[in-house]
Image (tube, rainbow, N blue to C red):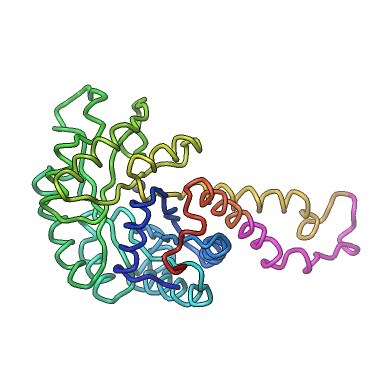
Amino acid sequence: MFYKGAQLKEVFEKAKRERFGIIASNVVFDFAIRPLLQGYEAYKSDGLLQLSSGAVKYAAGKSKDMEIGAQLISTIVKTLSQQFKNSGVGLHIDHATPNYFDFVVLCIEKNLVSSVMIDASKEDFDENIRISSEVVKVAHKHGVLVEGEIGYIKGAEDEIISDTELYTKPEEALEYVKKTGVDLFAASVGTNHGVTKGHKVHLKLDLIKEIDNLLISNKVETGIVLHGASGLTMNQQQEAIKNGVVKINKDTRYQMEIASAVQSYWEKEKDAIAKPEGISDDSYIPDKSRFDPRKWITKGEDAIQNAVEGLIQISGSAGKSILLR
Ligand SMILES: [Zn+2]
């Protein structure tokens, strides 16, 4: 089924309590949404699908009309998820920077999503708090959850950024969460894509626990989110979950799965659309039974379903849907 914010909140609270992780999967097409929903259902796991601004623009077609794109994906997710009774998914806007503020508000007010991420981490700390609070105010009025993030690099004048400045400082996390009231907090512990660019940063999983403990002792416990987690080992992900992570973002992994499944299909079936050497034009007939998109796109769909099922097993969310009581 499709979860609104209130149910999604329950999902993350349960995940936090029982220490498992929710796999948040970035989507663009219906043929990625279908296998993901099937995978969550097969393992009775709740999940989250997420949209980047680029995905929303793509979904609309050449117009790149973000409202149309978001409406389309939201409708697909809501419609397809109706058939599943042992799992639920929410829909989330990933990394909305302040220039997408109006778009985020529109998605909230039109009831298209269950949660949104406001990423004002490039602004200075106070401005980030101001913008994030603004989003929280609108979102909570409509029962939508908010994920926030803080920046790590202090001052553009710093030529050499020390390692410590790339990690979330627990006191700043506390101040940010307290002042904004976000439901989910993206911590930088050495995995964050944007931040680690050009820097060799090692993973500090203990930092998650430190942040989590500080938030809990100040009575502002939130779900912690791990971005850029595609490169982590199974043990690292499980350790992160044990320390307080409830949402693990996955994007690149699915892109690779679908590309390689389709690639290996066409490597074998190339002669269905391309005349092999040595065969005359007259005697070559393309083979519709093999180039029908349903024949090869489904290879990609199966690969995505396998991938999410594997991730669900690693994150411990199998059999944990809030619908199973
Ligand atoms: Zn991210």
Above-or-below relation of 252 to 201: below
Q: Where are the magenta residues, as a range?
A: 278-302
Q: Residue, x 89% and y 64% (percent of image)?
A: 282
Q: Nearer the viewer, residue 325 or 93?
A: 325
Which image quarter holds the C terminus?
bottom left
Left or right of 39, for residue 174: left
Left or right of 261, for residue 43: left
Q: Determine which quarter of the picture holds residue 52.
A: bottom left
Q: Residue, x 43% and y 63% (percent of image)?
A: 58
* 168 within the magenta span: no
Which image quarter holds the N terminus?
bottom left
* Predominant secondary structure, magenta span: helix
Q: Residue, x 59% and y 57% (percent of image)?
A: 305
* 301 within the magenta span: yes
- Image coords of residue 119 (percent x, y): 24, 51
Q: Nearer the viewer, residue 1 or 120?
A: 1
| Residue 61 seen anywhere in this rendered image of the structure | no
Q: Determine which quarter of the picture holds residue 240.
A: top left
Q: Nearer the viewer, residue 10 or 82?
A: 10
